[in-house]
Amino acid sequence: MTSGYTVPSREDDPVHTVRTIARIAQMLIELRDEYVARPRPDLLRQIDQRLEDLLGQQDELRHRMANLRSEEGGR
């Protein structure tokens, strides 16, 4: 019996990007909580960096969505 089973997916599958987006979102929540409890400039820089990371993931997701559409159109 296997615990934590995940369905295998291709490397360019959007699920990888969606998971990364979720990890970054969780980091932002944790940074928010830390900043609210103890505001510090370094935390603001970290929040800003995670927002930049999210923007990059948005581009990646759009790219992967376009690839899916082109694959579906070729069938």
Image (cartoon, rainbow, N blue to C red):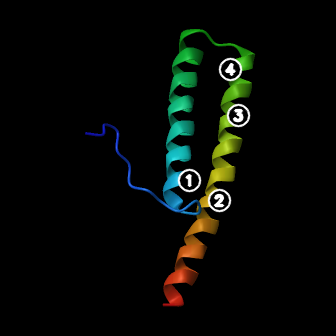
Q: Tell me residue 28's x, y (percent).
A: 56, 31
State the separation of the CA atoms marked 1 and 2. 7 Å
Q: Tell me residue 3's x, y (percent).
A: 31, 37
- Going from the N terminus, do you reach mark 3 or mark 1 first? 1
State the separation of the CA atoms marked 2 and 3. 19 Å
| Mark number displayed over residue 60 | 2
User: In the picture, residue 51 is in which quadrant?
Assistant: top right
Q: Nearer the viewer, mark 2 or mark 4?
A: 2
State the separation of the CA atoms marked 3 and 1. 20 Å
Of residue 6 and residue 22, the one placed in the foreground of this image is: 6
Q: Nearer the viewer, mark 2 or mark 3?
A: 2
Q: Which residue is mark 1?
A: 17
Q: Residues within 10 Å of mark 3 (few under 14, many from 20)?
A: few
State the separation of the CA atoms marked 4 and 3. 9 Å
Q: Image quadrant for the N terminus?
A: top left
- Going from the N terminus, do you reach mark 1 or mark 4 first? 1
Q: Which residue is mark 3?
A: 48
Q: Nearer the viewer, mark 1 or mark 4?
A: 1
Q: Are marks 1 and 2 in contact (CB under 8 Å)?
A: yes
Q: Secondary structure at mark 2?
A: helix
Q: Which residue is mark 4?
A: 43
| Residue type indicated by callout 3 | Asp
| Mark number displayed over residue 36 | none
Q: Is residue 5 left or right of residue 46?
A: left
